[in-house]
Amino acid sequence: MKTLFKFCYCLIALSLPWYAAAQQNAASPVSLNRIGDKLYEVTGGSGANGGAFIGEYGVLLIDAKMNQESVNQTIQEIRKLTDKPIRFLVNTHSDGDHVAGNRFFPESVVFVAHENCRKEFLLPGRNGQPSSWNDPALAPYIPSVTFSSKMDLYVDSKRAELWYFGTGHTTGDMVVCFPDDRIAFIGDQAFRGRTQLIHSYKGGNSFRHVETLEKMLETINAEKFYSGHSEALDRIMIRSHISEMKELQNKVAGYIKNNYTLENIKKEFNKDQGNLIETIYNEILASK
Ligand SMILES: [Zn+2]
């Protein structure tokens, strides 16, 4: 029976890409690595990579890690740098590995997200189960401040820009840009060396994803893009990610035209691209 439980647990874990990604980091403790002026990448612990801006009058955190231990470690690391309060915690999008830790921060923190991200907090999960965020006890930890296209936050004289460029990985992904440093945090909107995740069950869309990233490159001046699950990317890497996505979409469209089944189309790609190919296939059929 125990083995069966273990087996089921593994199946569930493997079916959740963010969970698997988060586990890769679970062994190393949370650390804040300096990447700019008062600006840090937050790596390690359980959950995605995020960011921290240690401002003159407070701290702005980007993404929350996933459990109490990792949140405590994050706070401890911040306390080594400043005794100022954590004023804002910005959730780049609604996936658990970026938001589950919200509930372990003090209630005084202001949680900020794109308006669609807040909506996604309360929607059923991939398996149709109701979201745990519907528990009224967790209400203070759901983003209370939202925006639609752009918002600036200040914990210092230096500006942090929150941008929304459109649907892609989900419907509510934001980009946090520090224009003075030419640095942006993009959550899960691109990875280096990993297949892109598109959450169709949250309204994500691969064709919109490409447009969203193009808009990002046109609009902000960042040269380095920090990702939730990989090393940072530069503008050339984002451009080649866009080209690769377009190439996949064109290939899938070609196979559909030639009456290939989804099963046969998948055989033409690497195994780890299976979910993305299925998403693209469904998007093309739905647009007909
Ligand atoms: Zn993630």
Image: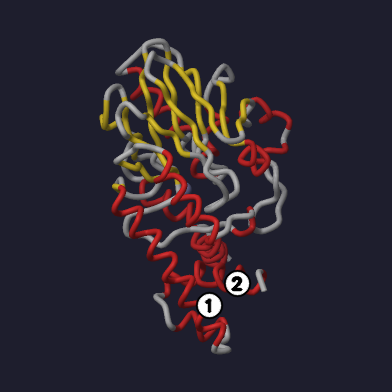
Reading the image, the residue beneath label 1 is 253
Taking depth in this image into account, of 141 and 3 the one nearest to the observer is 141
Q: Residue at x 55, y 61 (%)?
A: 12
Tell whether circle 2 marks a residue whose Cβ is less than 8 angstroms from ligand 1. Answer: no
Callout 2, which amino acid? Ile
Dividing the picture into quadrants, the one containing residue 26 is top left
Q: Amino acid at mark 1?
A: Ala
**First in sequence: mark 2 or mark 1?**
1
In the rendered image, residue 222, in percent from the top left (x then y), is placed at 34, 38
Reading the image, the residue beneath label 2 is 284
Left or right: 100 as drawn, with respect to 273: right
Q: Which quadrant does the C terminus fall into? A: bottom right
Q: Is 233 or 267 nearer to us in this picture? A: 233
Q: Is residue 77 above or below residue 167?
A: above
Quarter the N terminus occupies: bottom right
SS for dot 1: helix
Please tell me which residue is depicted at 62% across the width and 30% down the height of the picture: 146
**Measured from the top left, where is residue 75 in percent x and y?**
41, 23
How many other residues sit within 10 Å of disc 1, few (<14), some (14-19) or many (≥20)? Answer: some
Identify the residue shown where x is 43% and y is 40%.
219
Could you tell me residue 241's position as x and y percent?
A: 37, 59
Query: Where, by quadrant of the figure, is residue 205 drawn?
Result: bottom right
> How far across and how far down the image is residue 102, in percent?
54, 31
- Cα distance between the residues tagged 2 and 1: 7 Å
Q: Which sits in the foreground, 112 or 137?
A: 112
